[in-house]
Each structure stands twice: as C-alpha cells, then as structure tokens.
Amino acid sequence: MKFGKELASQMVQEWQTAYMDYHGLKTLLKNLIIFRQQNASPPPPEVSRSRSLKRRLTMYRAFSGLNNLRGSPKKGDDEAILVSSVQEEGSDHSYYQTMFLRSSEEGGQIELEFFRKLDHEFNKVEKFYKDKVDQVKAEAEELTKQMDALIALRIRVDKPRVEQRVAAQFSAAAPATVVASVNGLKQGGVQLDAIQEVEMSSEGDGGEEARAKRNRNFRPASLEVLDHVKINVEPDTPVSTLRNMIGNSKSDLSFSKVELSRAEEKLRQAFTEFYQQLRLLKSYCFLNMLAFSKIMKKYDKITSRSASKAYLEMVDNSYLGTSDEVNKLIERLEATFIKYFANGNRRKGMKSLKPGQKREKHRTTFFIGLFTGCSIALVVAIIVSLHGRALLEPEERTKYMESIFPLYSLFGFIVLHMLMYGTDTYFWRRYRVNYPFIFGFKPGTELGFREVFLLASGLSVLSLAAVLSNLDLEMDPDTLEYRTLTELVPLALVCVVFVITICPFNIVYRSSRYFLLHCAWRCVCAPLYKVTLPDFFLADQLTSQVQGFRSLLFYVYYYFLGDFTTRSNKFLETSNAYDILYIVVAIIPFWSRVIQCLRRLIEEKDPSQGVNSFKYFSTIVALVMRTIYSQKERDKSQNLMFWKIMAASTSGFTTIFNTYWDIVIDWGLLQRNSRNPWLRDKLLISNKAVYFVAIVVNILLRLVWMQLVLNFQVPFLHKKAMIALIACLEILRRGIWNFFRVENEHFNNVGKYRAFKTVPLPFHYEDEKIM
C-alpha cells in the first residue's frame, strides 16, 4: 500500500485537516518532475543505443560505501536549504522557516513553492499538536483532582473496613504489608499524585525491620478534600431529572455506597475516554513525523539533493519530535487505572483501556448468503401457494389483504429498514465516516453492514417461512381442523422477535439490542432525559415507521378484541376507539421529536430547535387531517370536501417545510456561496451528481405523501398494498436521508476537531484554588 493511502486510512478522520497535506506536497513534486522532463535535453545517441550498454556502464561507477545509505551527495548539496526558527513579534510562539538557496536553477520556483508549503504544513501540525498536548495536560490535572476526591470518598464510605485493615497491619499476627507508592509525574505543571494505599502481600518481605519502615512511610489519603466538593447529579433517570428541575444539579455528598459506585463508574469512563484521546494524539504525532520523512526522501530522490537530512533534523529537534508528555501521561494513566480500577490486575485493566478490535467472521458472510438464498426460495414458494389458493382472484384477495396482509407487512417494513441501515453502514465505512463515535457505540460493539444484513436476512427467512406455513396449513385438508393454530402463526412470530430483542443472554448481539432498547426508552420518556444524537436519530427512524405502529395496533385488536378464528375485522368499521388509536399511535414518534426539540431549545438556547419542533408539529397536524379524511371517506360522511381541503393544504405545507429542512438543515446542502455550488464546501463523494440526484429523489418521495389525499389508485394493486408501497418508499427515503445526515454530522465533527466524547466528571470543586 502506498503511504498516501496508508496515511488516509490510519488518520483520525475528525482531525484530517490538521494532518500534513501529503497529497498536496506530492503533487508539487510531480509538477517538478514534469517540468524537468519537458526542459531536459535528449540523451546522447550512444547512451540510448543499447540497454545492455547501460547496465555495463554502471559497473564502473564510484562505490559510495556500505554505511552511506543516502548515497554520496555532490559538493554543495548540503547547502540547498537553510532551516531556522523565527519568533513571532509580541508572542512566545515561534515558527519554522526554510530558505531555499537554489531558486535560480531550473525548476527552482517549484521547489521554492514546495518548501513554503512544507513549512506551512509543519507549523500547522506542530501548533495543533502543542495545543492538544496543553489541553490533555489540563484534563490530566482535573482528573488528578477527581481521583483525590474519589479515594477520599472510598475511605469515608469504607471507613470501618479500612480502619480494621490498617490496624491489622501493625499487629504481630498480621501478614506483611507492602505500601504502593508511585512518584507523581510532574511535567509542564501537571501533577499526577497517587494517594497511598496498603496492599496485602505474602510473607517474606524483608523481615520485621523492613515492615516497620514501610509502616512509618504509610501516608493515608486526606479527607479534607471532601469538605470542598459536591457530587454532580446528572439527569440519568426521570426521577433525578424532576429533582434537578427543583434544586441544583450539584448536591452534597451523602457518603453512600451507591454514590461511590456511580462516581467510580463515571471516573472509569472518563479515564477510558482520556486514554483513547492520548492514543489518538500519539498516533497523530507518529503519522505526521513519518509523513515528513517520506516526503523529504521523495524530494531527495527527485532532485538528487540531500536536503532531507537538514530538514528532518529540524523536525526531530522541534516540539513535535522532542515532546514526550503524551507518552508519560499514557504510562502514568495505565498505572493509575490498573491500580485503582482493576485492583492491580494489569490484564483486566488494559482490557478495559484497550478494547479488542472487532474481527470479521467468515461465517457471517456464509449465513448471509444462506439466508438470502432461502428467502428467494421462500418467495417463489409463496407465489406458487398464492396461485394454488386462488388468492389472486378479487374475492379471495380482498379477504386476505384485509386480514392477513397487515399482520405480515410489519416484518416487511422492519426488514427493509434494516437493509437500508446496513447499506448506510457500508457506505459510511467505505468513505471513512466514524459512525460508531457519532452514535456513541461502545468500542468494538457496533454492528457493521455484514451483521445488519445477517439480521435482516434472518428475520426475512422467519417471516417468509411463517407466511408459507400459514398458506400451507390452509391448503392441506388434514390441517383445517387446526385453523385456530394456523391463525396464531403471525402472533407467534411477533412473540419470537420480541423475546429475542429483550433476551438477557449474550446472544444475537446483546449490546446492540440493549443499546436500541435504551434509546427507545429515552425516546418514550423524551422530556425527562437529556437529548443525545442517538435518541433523536432513532426517533427520526420511527417517524418513517408509521404503518409499522399501525400494524402493531392491528395485532392487538385482531387477536385480543376481534375474532381471529373467522378472520373477522369488523372493528375497522365499527370501533371509534380504534379510529382514535389509529391516529394516536401514528403521531407518537413525531410527538417524541417535538418534545426533544423543545428540551434542546430550553437547554441549548438554540432558536433553530424551536423551528424544528414546529416542523414536527405541522407534520402531526397533516397526519391527523389525512387520517380523518380517509376515515370520513370510508364512512361516506358529509363535509368530505372540507376534510379533503384541510388534508391537502396541511400536507402540502408540511411536505415543502420538511423537504427544505431535509436538504438545507439536515444535509447542509444548497449553499449558494460554497466551494461546490449549491452543495456544501466539503463532500465525501467526489461525483457531485450523486447529491443532486439525492435532492431530486428526496423531493419526489416527499411528494408521495400527497397520494394518500389525492387517492391515485393503481388498478392491479389493492388499497392495503398501495399503503404498504407508500410506507416502503418512505423507508427508502429515510435510508437515503440517513447517509447524508450522518455525513453532515461527520463534517461538523471535523470542523470542530471533535474526535472523542466528553464524559461528565463526578465531583465539582467549590473552590478551584484548593490543591
């Protein structure tokens, strides 16, 4: 793999603009090669006469020695460049500047431009790295203070046990003790002091004299720090949210074990995220150092100079090459985490700090192919069964479509949505979008496109097998007496899927299932939780599953309030409660988004969230009007024209509003003054036509909503099938929306260099001057 591709694959994508522009520098060197080729004189005829002659002539060249790996430079080549450090006026910051001494030679202007860009890139990289190092040093200082408070809280909560343990070490019968003492690292004003703790060890530790000496050196943690801190109470539960609405989010310590456990968990997460941040920063330094080495060696090879030696010496002696704060912080953090959060178990501690990389399994691909093939075979078998039961005839078709089709269409909506999400994850990974970080997945637990396709194909096999079994049981005269069991097949399938979803055992991607359930619960209790991106992203997905929610309502009425043994669904025409719930279940995801936007408006003071909430509220109004109009049309009520006008006007308004918001706000496109006209400054896909096609497709699929009002009917499609088709088109639109929405979020993270999440710390110091 060429280094340019290797650099692009290993860089932190959110910091990509802060890396050395290797491609731009390489382009300048290519221009230099082209210039020299165009201005070079043709070789003498006797030199190009024979290839064998060239090879023989090389045998007479002077030998440069085995130790001189860079060759024997010509006289004066070492003086091609002069690198110096320049101090900015009125500032402590300095930058590096290279003076090219051969600008008068042919191609010298290109080389001069190359070194100007090289200096710019190096100063950019060094400044970014220094700023990030200063930032992590400040965070290390804060984590040190948090650790002091945590250790003091541990002693206060476990006071009886600690006192007994400390007293036991001074008794003659007590086993030997070892006082673990690690010198604090003090680098650039950062002090990471470790509070002493006593660890029990085996006998034979040096005798009574050595044991007594260690006991005299034992220094317990000071508890005075607890007088200056409060506990940060985050609204993790609806109850705590309501409590914080009344009082302050920072409360006094109660010195309970629950409080200690929560503080340890938060600080553990903070240490883990901080460790990942340090690793990214170390990788950033290494890749850029390697990039400067590669580009300078390429320059030497093209120009036959030895300028890389002088320039790389400057790089090695710069802050980028000499700073070791990050390495020392990594070592100290590992020792601290292992000691205080893994009970001295290094393997356990490093496993928490460095979660294992996810490995692709060949069996996943095998089962995808197997389930896909089975699904195709089942579809063919279902088509044959439909002909066998004459379900394509109008009378039988109407009965089946009104009763059985709504039961199985639910799984079609879910499978299609999973396929679209799997396609999105494939393209996110292809274009190096860090979607696990954007969604907040725990490292190593995110589902890739193969896993999503596996789940979708598996569910497809289950649902299609259920449809086929239902048809076969009705066709076989021997099973007609088990008609009740036949009608229970869809309900059994729903129960199986529900049980798998909530299964507590570590099977079928438990961490992802529980992450989904956690986000769904937060969407249900939207006003009582702080809104995060996974929460409102899932709520947006649910707004495209309106017909799926209505299918679940049909399940409840069909099996518990109707007569499923005779396929009676009279409640569709006679039950007013069903008509009301038919509207209510459809607006639940939209209402959740309204509440989420209002909460963000209150917390973030962002007026755009208020506009966004109005957008979803207008969608609710349009949805209610369309549903009422369809119900009035079914009952052939009077004033039908009034409801049609209301449905058409509200649907038209919300379609225009939602389309504008999708393209301009969520996707960030249609920016008139951007570098890519009518798109945005940064694009993942080089082919700009893709974005314009996506805009047109989004507009057309948004207009499909109007079909429910205008009642365009396809002759060979039943009304239920038409509704299902429109629902599938909305799911397809949502899948397209997902890719560009996450792409826009990715570029927002890139613009802010946001490559890791911030974990709230458990303790708040009232007096920042202490310690």
Image: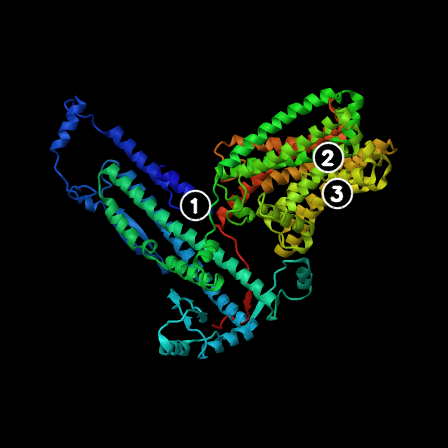
Asked where in the image residue 158 lies, by quadrant, the reply is bottom right
Which of pointers 1 and 3 lies earlier in the amino acid sequence? 1
Residue 530: give x, y in percent of width and height. 63, 55
Q: Are marks 1 and 3 in contact (CB under 8 Å)?
A: no
Q: Please give the name of the residue rendered at 35% of the width and 73% of the height, measured from the top-left corner.
A: 206
Q: Identify residue type, mark 3.
A: Val
Q: Identify residue type, mark 2.
A: Val
Would you name the residue on which mark 1 appears? Answer: 17
Residue 509: give x, y in percent of width and height. 57, 44
Which of pointers 3 and 2 lies earlier in the amino acid sequence? 2
Q: Residues within 10 Å of mark 1 (few under 14, many from 20)?
A: some
Whole-angstrom CA distance, mark 1 to mark 2, is 56 Å
* Residue 167 visible (yes or no): yes
Would you name the residue on which mark 2 appears? Answer: 489
Q: Identify residue type, mark 1.
A: Thr
Would you name the residue on which mark 3 appears? Answer: 585
Residue 516 vs 246, above or below: the answer is: above
| In the displayed structure image, the side of residue 121 where residue 343 appears, left or right | right
- Label 2 sits on a secondary structure element that is helix
Q: Nearer the viewer, residue 322 or 310?
A: 322
- Label 3 sits on a secondary structure element that is helix
Disc 3 versus disc 2: nearer the observer: 2
- Label 1 sits on a secondary structure element that is helix
Asked where in the image residue 73 lies, by quadrant, the reply is top left
